[in-house]
């Protein structure tokens, strides 16, 4: 028995020394100032007292060590129930990063190619057309044939022409509403994933594939691609290939009932900028809904700060955590490389600001943006509609997860202030 314990301890030490772990540590050993990190406390409390947000959880890790991991504020207006570190948050579009990794796993296994047409896996897209004209007087519209098929790469970079229903051009919202596609980016009890994506293929594209960047339901389509290629539901695939290996035990599309009490409420701001609680609402409480085989790869997951930190730490480590590999180092290098060079140059890319660009499934900072923010070139990141946020800075060996559930958030710049405090705390 002692021999087994010794071997287990030896393995854990080796994993830690090889930089594959995520463990509680001290700021000083990670090359950071504990005193400066503590300034996050005061900043957060200030925003809570001013009712700019209700509270949440913040986690910072550097060199594989968690140097800051705290919860703030109260879950209820009566201030009787404080937020806790293990609270579960709706992460919305932070689901996209996880779906992206699922696709990249299939890519590195040779089961699909990034430039494959999506109709190879979802035949309904063989009939998809692009919107030409829309007549607002009678809501009729005309379409054109596609010049090129939608590819997996188009979907990963949001250049497919598939948008959200509230996006331009004029008429897209009407068309999406007519097809029953509005409000389905988080959950649905009316359709399965397959049914939703096949119906989405009936909608015209907002523009020709590859023409420009426009945020949309692309990752939801990729979630269905994962199902077709793997022969498993998206929920089962992600659990088997990402969540279980990384011990992300609190990340789900549909929360088990024993975890319902850990799902935080959703707040918003009224017209006077005062916080209010949404209350019970099926659209808001979708993580507690029954499993109808609908899994929104672009926004349907809920998770904890620590679970998500384990996910992005694995990416920072080159695809491995605690000895369990989810991606190869080279695959991550491909995934985190700029995909918008030409489109950015002609003004149709992710951003008109040099150096703020997009890779596969994440926004990316390149050398051109050095000095525009504290984040190093090579940092890749994303956020969620309910005010969650993460980033991965390989140059500083640094990760950040911020969990808040408020929408819309009138004070989203809060994360920029916290980011400044984090980088100011780096001392080596």
Image (tube, helix red, strand yellow):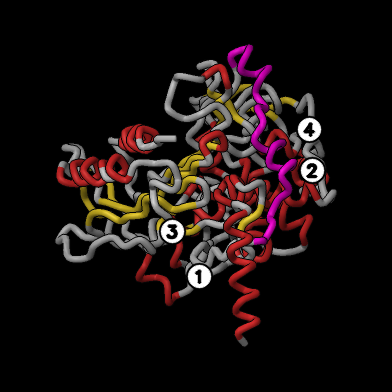
Of labels 3 and 2, earlier in sequence is 3
**Residue at x-position 53% and y-position 30%:** 171
The first of marks 1 and 4 along the sequence is 4
Mark 4 → mark 3, Cα distance in angstroms: 48 Å
Sequence-wise, which precedes: disc 4 or disc 2? 2
User: Dot 4 surroundings within 10 Å: few (below 14), some, or many (20 or more)?
Assistant: many
Q: Is residue 192 visible?
A: no
Mark nearer the N terminus (4 vs 3): 3
Q: Earlier in the sequence, mark 3 or mark 1?
A: 3
The relative height of residue 225 versus residue 149 in the rendered view (above or below) is below
User: How many numbered marks appear?
Assistant: 4
The residue carrying mark 4 is: 149
Res 245 → quadrant? bottom right
User: What quarter of the picture does the N terminus occupy?
Assistant: bottom right
Residue 377 sits in quarter: top right
Label 4 sits on a secondary structure element that is: loop
Q: Secondary structure at mark 3?
A: strand
What separation in Å lies between label 1 and label 4 (alpha carbons)? 35 Å
**Helix, strand or loop at mark 1:** loop
Marks 3, 1: nearer the viewer: 3
Q: CA distance from mark 2 to mark 1?
A: 30 Å
Residue receiving disc 2: 119
Check disc 3 and report the residue beneath it: 24
Q: Which residues are magenta?
A: 323-347
Q: Is residue 425 visible?
A: yes
Residues tagged 4 and 2 counted as in contact (Cβ below 8 A): yes
Tell me, for residue 116, which label it has, or none.
Answer: none
């Amino acid at each position: 028995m002692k021999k087994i314990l010794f071997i287990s301890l030896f393995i854990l030490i080796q994993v830690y020394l090889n930089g594959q772990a995520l463990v509680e540590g001290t700021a000083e050993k990670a090359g950071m100032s504990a005193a400066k990190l503590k300034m996050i406390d005061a900043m957060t409390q200030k925003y809570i007292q001013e009712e700019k947000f209700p509270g949440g959880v913040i986690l910072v890790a550097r060199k594989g060590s968690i140097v800051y991991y705290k919860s703030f504020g109260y879950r209820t207006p009566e201030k009787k129930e404080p937020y806790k570190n293990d609270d579960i948050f709706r992460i919305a579009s932070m689901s996209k990063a996880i779906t992206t990794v699922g696709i990249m796993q299939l890519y590195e296994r040779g089961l699909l190619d990034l430039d494959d047409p999506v109709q190879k896996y979802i035949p309904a897209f063989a009939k998809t057309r692009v919107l030409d004209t829309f007549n607002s007087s009678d809501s009729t519209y005309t379409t054109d044939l596609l010049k090129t098929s939608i590819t997996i790469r188009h979907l990963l970079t949001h250049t497919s022409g598939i948008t959200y229903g509230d996006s331009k051009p004029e008429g897209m919202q009407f068309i999406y509403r007519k097809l029953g596609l509005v409000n389905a980016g988080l959950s649905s009890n009316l359709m399965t994933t397959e049914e939703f994506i096949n119906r989405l293929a009936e909608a015209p594209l907002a523009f020709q594939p590859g023409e420009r960047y426009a945020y949309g339901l692309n990752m939801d389509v990729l979630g269905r691609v994962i199902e077709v290629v793997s022969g498993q539901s998206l929920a089962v695939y992600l659990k088997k290939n990402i969540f279980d290996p990384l011990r992300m035990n609190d990340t789900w599309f549909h929360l088990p009932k024993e975890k319902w009490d850990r799902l935080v409420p959703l707040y918003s701001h009224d017209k006077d900028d005062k916080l209010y609680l949404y209350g019970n609402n099926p659209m808001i409480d979708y993580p507690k809904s029954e499993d109808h085989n609908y899994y929104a790869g672009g926004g349907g997951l809920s998770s904890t700060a620590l679970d998500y930190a384990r996910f992005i730490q694995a990416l920072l480590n080159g695809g491995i955590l605690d000895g369990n590999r989810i991606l190869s180092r080279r695959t991550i290098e491909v995934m985190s490389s700029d995909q918008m060079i030409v489109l950015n140059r002609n003004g149709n890319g992710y951003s008109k600001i040099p150096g703020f660009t997009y890779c596969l499934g994440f926004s990316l900072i390149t050398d051109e943006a050095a000095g525009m923010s504290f984040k190093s070139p090579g940092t890749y990141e994303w956020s969620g509609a309910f005010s969650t946020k993460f980033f991965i800075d390989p140059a500083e060996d640094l990760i950040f997860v911020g969990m808040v559930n408020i929408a819309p958030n009138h004070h989203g710049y809060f994360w920029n202030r916290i980011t400044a405090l984090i980088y100011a705390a780096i001392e080596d």
